[in-house]
């Protein structure tokens, strides 16, 4: 017996093909195309891992890396800003926070992810720059105080204490112990000593 046709319906609605043993609710809605419904089911399977595509070696493709969060991006920008302003002696948590339109409290919260304070991070990066300068042969004529001031240390005593605490040696002794910064001067002095000794032997 033919099914009764409700008012507003046509026989086209009664011939809706089935897309599975249990059609989802959206497939029962008049006007929803079957292909669209099947596409939605396919998307659901992909989201649960069913029917996942495989790599060229036949194995499953590795899951994509999660995108960096906005917090990670903000922290990366802040560290880049610090790196560009290490020479500024006035660099502080307040100036860093103001440059990025955040509160000082939130700035400290961001750096807790690295288990260090903002001030400790700035000091460590400054000390690393100072250490690199102290052992650089090209900067052999630059004094220890100049190196400290170049990277934001106004007080030489504060710089010396922080440097020794970080590296176990004062900034004055580091170049001597490494032998890198003063190597040109040492070679020059050795050459002069050899020539002086040769001159004495020639006069004897």
Image (cartoon, grey):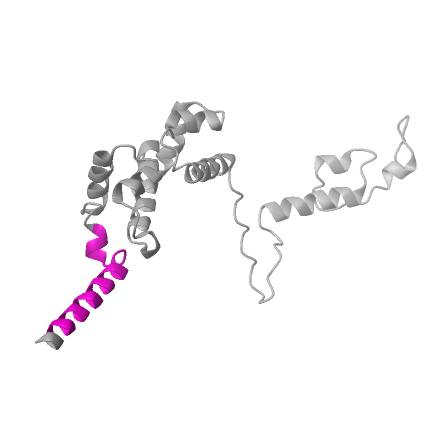
Please indicate, yes or no, whether residue 89 appears anywhere in the rendered image: yes
Q: 109 or 180, which lies in front?
A: 180
Q: Residue at x 21, y 51 (%)?
A: 174
- As drawn, which residue projects farthest toward the left? 204
Magenta span contains residue 193: yes
| 180 w.r.t. 46: above or below | below
**Magenta part, dominant SS:** helix
- Whole-percent x and y of residue 38? 74, 46
| 7 w.r.t. 21: above or below | above
Q: Quadrant of residue 107?
A: top left
| 51 w.r.t. 155: above or below | below
- Whole-percent x and y of residue 75? 45, 36
Q: Quadrant of residue 109?
A: top left
Count of numbered labels shown in the rendering: 0
**Quarter of the rendering occupied by the N terminus:** top right
Q: Residue at x 60, y 45 (%)?
A: 47
Please indicate, yes or no, whether residue 121 appears anywhere in the rendered image: no
Q: In the image, is 147 to the left or to the right of 2?
A: left
Per the rendered image, the range of residues in magenta is 174-200
Q: In the image, is 43 to the left or to the right of 33?
A: left
Q: 82 or 12, which lies in front?
A: 82
Q: In the image, is 142 to the left or to the right of 67?
A: left
Q: 34 or 56, which lies in front?
A: 56
- Whole-percent x and y of residue 35? 78, 45
Magenta span contains residue 50: no
Q: 114 or 64, which lies in front?
A: 114
Q: In the image, is 107 to the left or to the right of 167?
A: right
Q: Residue at x 34, y 45 (%)?
A: 129
**Quarter of the rendering occupied by the C terminus:** bottom left
């Amino acid at each position: 017996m033919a099914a009764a046709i409700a008012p507003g319906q046509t026989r086209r609605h009664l011939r809706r093909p089935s897309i599975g043993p249990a059609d989802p609710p959206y497939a029962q809605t008049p006007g929803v195309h079957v292909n669209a419904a099947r596409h939605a089911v396919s998307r659901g399977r992909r989201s649960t891992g069913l029917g996942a595509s495989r790599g060229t070696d036949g194995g499953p493709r590795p899951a994509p890396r999660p995108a960096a969060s906005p917090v990670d991006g903000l922290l990366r920008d802040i560290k880049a800003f610090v790196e560009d302003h290490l020479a500024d002696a006035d660099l502080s948590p307040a100036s860093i926070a103001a440059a990025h339109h955040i509160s000082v409290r939130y700035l400290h919260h961001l750096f807790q992810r690295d288990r260090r304070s903002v001030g400790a991070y700035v000091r460590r990066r400054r000390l690393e720059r100072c250490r690199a300068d102290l052992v650089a042969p090209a900067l052999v004529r630059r004094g220890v105080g100049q190196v400290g001031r170049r990277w934001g240390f106004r007080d030489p005593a504060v710089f010396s204490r922080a440097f020794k605490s970080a590296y176990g040696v004062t900034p004055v002794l580091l170049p001597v112990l490494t032998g890198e910064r003063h190597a040109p001067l040492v070679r020059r002095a050795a050459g002069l000593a050899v020539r002086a000794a040769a001159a004495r032997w020639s006069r004897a």
